[in-house]
């Protein structure tokens, strides 16, 4: 490098200081959230604030008393799992067809898929809600899951991925007499693991954190997801800040843990969707 | 509505034509069979999108010309909703706020570029740890993020005003004061998406060959000149991508406003609420609080026009500054 | 292309609809020996256990009926209920309040009960007449009163002692209240006398009637907000904010008055009889607070309101739902309610409530019935309630004078009432 060593070292220190300040701003709110979640209401509202917790773990228990939190965790897990599995299967099927098979109307159909991405979700919501109501699906896991099984974005993401795989692979399989379904299942899917992982991670993230749709379709607290349940806890004026902090920490924890465990894949998945998608 | 934020990744990507196979393909014996398989494979997503996405868009368009009773049932009223909308202060304010969120939200981009550039310095230690910490807000539930910030922003007992008081500044009631509420929310938006943008930019920067910088260094270009002449132009596709995402995301802001500003009665008793109301929140309020769904449909059609216009402008402008390597 | 999409979508929908329709069975009233689950929507988390206890008592006599108590917090209750009604997913039985009864009855969402009441010979005179009237629309009774509530002043004894102020006594006046407020306010400790919450029922409706004003005319056709006496009732609160004896609206938006009171930042909290369970449970308040009657202005007044249980017009089991509502309105149910819940509406069952909450002067809320004013409503109460918030927010922040805001509110409200 052209920089002189001393200057480089100075620059490096400045870099670390800047990054550390940035990181503190990123993580600080979470620490404050945790600290507050262990305080009594009176101590949380001290001026100036106290920096020692009261170790009041009962705030976490209160969350379960105020909400059917166990149900909501289960709903969120099931919704996330079903949406993710559905999208991985359905999107990869369609993506494979668009990327590798020839059929009349391919361009047109793909164009129609593309058009879905251009539309902001609020435009779908009223009719989607009506459909759920007509089918008697309001306040059910089905309502949470079904519209989320289909994703134009997932098809695009995986199609781009399939397009990037070498053609020789399926050509060879064709010569061996394999049909499209065999090639999709035994040749393409195993090769598409990184793409599937990226889509899977993104879908988990969106489903877990989704608010708008669950808020609208499931009004019975036992059928709510965590984000909608938590939002209702906040709306309830009785709920105090320490309990809110405990609830919000509990609700976001699973994805944070997942992120910590699969950090590399998360980052790659995001970078993939942004740069290579 | 995080889904849409990244959901648009491909609006951008597909603008680049997909590679066409150079070689003639070897076909199955029956072209018809191949097509049949293709339709079969596309069918689940195709039908799902048709029923739950395409058909609803048309219906929403239709609903925007109807008026709904308090408990459902609707009748055709022609352009009434649009006429009301054009003169409705609440709608115009929400549109103005939404545009303000969108423009101010773009300030997050230079910030993310700066952090990405710092993380991209050669042989820097702890890059993955920094990246993980910056990324934490991205994976945290938006409702939880909004609650934490609501508490941090508390005018009387919040941490932020305590820190400010240490340097002798009396902080405002950030999200309850009409003068500051919008900016306070924008800051949370930037905070939330910073890690995501850094990851995109960092990936973009890492794809730039080191030799370019070495060659520039030999020519005597300093760090800043290198950044301006090499990094920025080669990063322009990522910058474009992130700015399109940021605009589309900001235009659909809901979660933050819902949790930090309130909804229904609590929003109405919040003196700052008119300053932070977004189009999508107004849509929610009309569609699911006052049950005025026809009017809500008209509001969201206006949003569609806004999004299409702003995105089209961005694509038009991109030709001037985005370089696809 | 679009046509194809539309046809395809319609076909899929039609098929799906056919499947569910076949699965749902008919809407005929179920035979009494058939197993039925009724959903029962409520909004108060504190009352969920007692509602479940009442439901269990009912199930004992009706083993084929299961009751599923659903809690939707107050902030979302009406939004969600309306959405559920619109979507055909309304709970079978649910809590109804004054502001909404006429809207729901007028739109045929809830079932008129008069015929059933006559046939079952239910005696309506056991409930306060104001409440039966509240739930009567165009001559038909739509709900059986469940409970009632009145408003009083909850005060923090510790803060009164610290400021050397005598506890509020029966017959205290606005002047007494204002004098106490001045002494109780302690900026150094961050303590305010009271929180001028922007809420009608516990706050400005009471002072409006105490000042001799009114919210809406007796025939429900004209707004009372341009009445000078009404404006005095509003000024009561805006003055408290102006004098910094109440936190401003920004502070109360950041932190709800209830939280401020429960952490010792407010010396007084205007609240209802329903607060007994919250304050009795909360560690901070259970030993520190007590109740007093509202201060007297030009006259003595408190808002009385009560909930009723209503039956969804679309319930799949109307016979069973009525059985349940009848039980909810009965003496055995009121006896259970009184022990663990709000004041039961059934005359003669209130002593249980007093005994169950003996740590507070609960009698304050029962005595208030004699001078209570019914909660002001009209056919579309929600429409002008929205307008109230919109206009009064400006007065409370000081953006607009209270008189100008109230007059503007009266104009808007009269326009809305004319449309009903």
Image (cartoon, coloured by chain):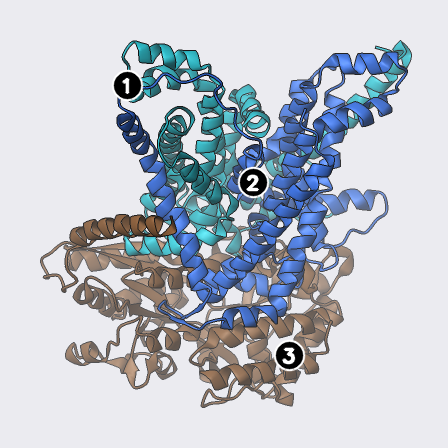
Chain colours: A cyan, B blue, C brown
Query: Marks 1/3: CA distance?
Result: 79 Å
Q: Is residue A52 visible?
A: no
Q: Residue C261: image x %, image y %? A: 61, 59
Q: Residue C175: image x %, image y %? A: 68, 81
Name the element at disc 3. helix
Q: Chain of mark 2?
A: B
Q: Is residue A182 above or below residue C261?
A: above
Q: Residue at x 73, y 72 (%)?
A: C398
Q: Quadrant of the C terminus of chain B?
A: top right
Q: Chain of mark 1?
A: A
Name the element at disc 1. loop
Residue at which label 3 appears: C234
Dot 3, crowdedness within 10 Å: few (<14), some or many (≥20)? many
Q: Nearer the viewer, residue C67 or C187?
A: C67
Q: Residue at x 29, y 32 (%)?
A: B40
Q: Residue at x 28, y 57 (%)?
A: C39
Q: Residue at x 54, y 84 (%)?
A: C415
Residue at which label 1 appears: A179
Q: Nearer the viewer, residue A177 or C180?
A: A177
The answer to whether residue C51 is left or right of residue B104 is left
Q: Chain of mark 3?
A: C
Residue at which label 2 appears: B5
Q: Residue B262: image x %, image y %? A: 57, 57
The answer to whether residue B3 is left or right of residue C256 is left
Q: Is residue B121 above or below residue B194?
A: above
Q: Residue A23: image x %, image y %? A: 70, 29
Query: Marks 2/1: CA distance?
Result: 37 Å
């Amino acid at each position: 490098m052209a920089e002189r060593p001393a200057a480089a070292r100075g620059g490096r220190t400045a870099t670390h200081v800047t990054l550390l300040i940035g990181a503190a701003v990123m993580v600080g709110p979470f620490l404050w959230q945790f600290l507050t979640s262990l305080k009594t209401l009176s101590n949380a509202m001290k001026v100036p604030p106290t920096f020692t917790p009261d170790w009041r773990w009962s705030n976490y228990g209160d969350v379960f008393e105020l909400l059917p939190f166990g149900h909501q965790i289960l709903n969120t897990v099931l919704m996330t799992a079903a949406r993710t599995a559905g999208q991985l299967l359905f999107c990869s099927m369609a993506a494979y067809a668009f990327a590798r098979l020839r059929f009349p109307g391919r361009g047109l159909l793909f164009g129609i898929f593309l058009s879905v991405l251009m539309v902001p979700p609020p435009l779908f919501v009223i009719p989607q809600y009506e459909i759920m109501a007509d089918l008697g699906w309001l306040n059910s896991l089905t309502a949470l899951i079904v519209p989320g099984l289909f994703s134009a974005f997932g098809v695009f993401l995986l199609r781009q991925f399939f397009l990037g795989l070498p053609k020789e692979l399926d050509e060879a399989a064709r010569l061996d007499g394999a049909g499209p379904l065999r090639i999709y299942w035994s040749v393409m899917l195993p090769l598409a693991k990184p793409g599937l992982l990226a889509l899977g991670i993104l879908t988990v993230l969106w489903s877990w954190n989704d608010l708008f749709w669950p808020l609208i379709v499931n009004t019975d607290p036992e059928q709510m997801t965590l984000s909608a349940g938590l939002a209702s806890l906040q709306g309830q004026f009785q709920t105090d800040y320490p309990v809110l902090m405990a609830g919000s920490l509990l609700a976001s924890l699973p994805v944070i843990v997942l992120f910590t465990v699969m950090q590399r894949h998360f980052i790659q998945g995001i970078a993939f969707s942004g740069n290579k998608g | 509505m995080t889904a849409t934020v990244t959901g648009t990744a491909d609006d951008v990507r597909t603008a680049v034509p997909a590679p066409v196979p150079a070689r003639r393909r070897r076909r199955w014996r029956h072209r018809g069979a191949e097509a049949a398989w293709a339709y079969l494979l596309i069918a689940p997503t195709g039908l799902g999108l048709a029923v739950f996405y395409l058909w609803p868009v048309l219906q929403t368009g239709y609903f925007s010309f109807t008026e709904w009773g308090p408990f459902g049932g609707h009748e055709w009223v022609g352009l009434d909703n649009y006429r009301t909308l054009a003169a409705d202060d609440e709608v115009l304010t929400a549109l103005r706020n939404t545009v303000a969120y969108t423009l101010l939200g773009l300030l997050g981009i230079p910030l993310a570029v700066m952090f990405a550039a710092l993380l991209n310095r050669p042989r820097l230690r702890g890059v993955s740890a920094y990246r993980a910490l910056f990324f934490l807000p991205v994976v945290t539930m938006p409702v939880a993020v909004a609650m934490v910030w609501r508490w941090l922003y508390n005018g009387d007992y919040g941490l932020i005003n305590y820190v400010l008081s240490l340097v002798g500044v009396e902080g405002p009631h950030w999200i309850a004061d009409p003068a500051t509420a919008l900016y306070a929310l924008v800051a949370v938006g930037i905070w939330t998406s910073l890690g995501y943008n850094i990851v995109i930019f960092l990936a973009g920067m890492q794809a730039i060959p080191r030799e370019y910088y070495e060659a520039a260094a030999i020519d005597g270009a300093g760090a800043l000149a290198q950044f301006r002449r090499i990094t920025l132009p080669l990063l322009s596709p990522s910058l474009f991508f992130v700015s399109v995402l940021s605009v589309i995301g900001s235009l659909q802001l809901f979660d933050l406003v819902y949790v930090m500003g309130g909804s229904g009665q609590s929003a109405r008793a919040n003196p700052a609420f008119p300053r932070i109301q977004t189009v999508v929140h107004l849509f929610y309020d009309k569609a699911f609080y006052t049950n005025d769904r026809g009017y809500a449909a008209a509001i969201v059609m206006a949003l569609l026009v806004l999004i299409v216009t702003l995105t089209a402008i961005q694509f038009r402008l991109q030709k001037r500054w985005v370089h696809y390597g | 292309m679009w046509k194809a999409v539309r046809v395809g979508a319609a076909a899929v929908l039609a098929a799906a609809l056919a499947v569910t329709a076949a699965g749902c069975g008919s809407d005929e009233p179920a035979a009494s020996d058939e197993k039925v689950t009724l959903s029962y929507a409520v909004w108060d988390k504190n009352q969920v256990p007692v509602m479940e206890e009442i439901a269990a008592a009912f199930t004992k006599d009706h083993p084929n009926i299961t009751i599923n108590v659903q809690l939707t917090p107050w902030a979302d209750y009406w939004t969600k209920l309306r959405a559920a009604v619109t979507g055909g997913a309304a709970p079978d039985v649910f809590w109804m309040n004054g502001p909404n009864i006429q809207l729901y009855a007028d739109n045929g969402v809830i079932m008129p009960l008069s015929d059933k009441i006559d046939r079952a010979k239910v005696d309506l005179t056991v409930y306060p007449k104001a409440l039966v009237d509240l739930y009567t629309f165009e001559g038909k009774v739509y709900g059986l009163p469940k409970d009632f509530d009145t408003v009083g002043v909850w005060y923090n004894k510790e803060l009164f002692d610290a400021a050397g102020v005598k506890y509020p006594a029966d017959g205290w006046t606005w002047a007494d209240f204002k004098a106490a407020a001045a002494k109780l306010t302690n900026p150094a400790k961050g303590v305010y006398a009271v929180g001028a919450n922007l809420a009608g029922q516990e706050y400005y409706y009471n002072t409006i009637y105490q000042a001799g004003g009114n919210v809406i005319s007796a025939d429900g056709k004209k707004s009372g907000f341009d009445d000078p006496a009404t404006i005095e009732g509003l000024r009561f609160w805006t003055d408290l904010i102006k004098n910094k004896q109440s936190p401003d609206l920004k502070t109360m938006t950041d932190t709800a008055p209830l939280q401020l009171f429960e952490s010792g930042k407010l010396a007084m909290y205007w609240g209802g009889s329903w607060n007994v369970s919250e304050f009795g449970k909360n560690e901070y308040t259970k030993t520190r607070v007590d109740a007093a009657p509202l201060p007297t202005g030009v006259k003595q007044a408190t808002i009385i309101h009560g909930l009723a249980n209503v039956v969804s017009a679309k319930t799949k089991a109307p016979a069973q739902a009525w059985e349940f509502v009848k039980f909810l309105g009965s003496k055995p149910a009121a006896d259970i309610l009184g022990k663990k819940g709000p004041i039961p509406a059934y005359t003669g069952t209130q002593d249980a409530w007093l005994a169950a909450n003996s740590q507070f002067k609960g009698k304050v809320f029962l005595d208030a019935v004699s001078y209570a004013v019914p909660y002001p409503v009209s056919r579309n109460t929600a429409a002008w309630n929205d307008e109230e918030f919109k206009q009064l927010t400006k007065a409370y922040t000081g953006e607009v004078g209270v008189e100008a805001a109230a007059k503007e509110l009266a104009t808007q409200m009269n326009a809305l009432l004319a449309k009903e």
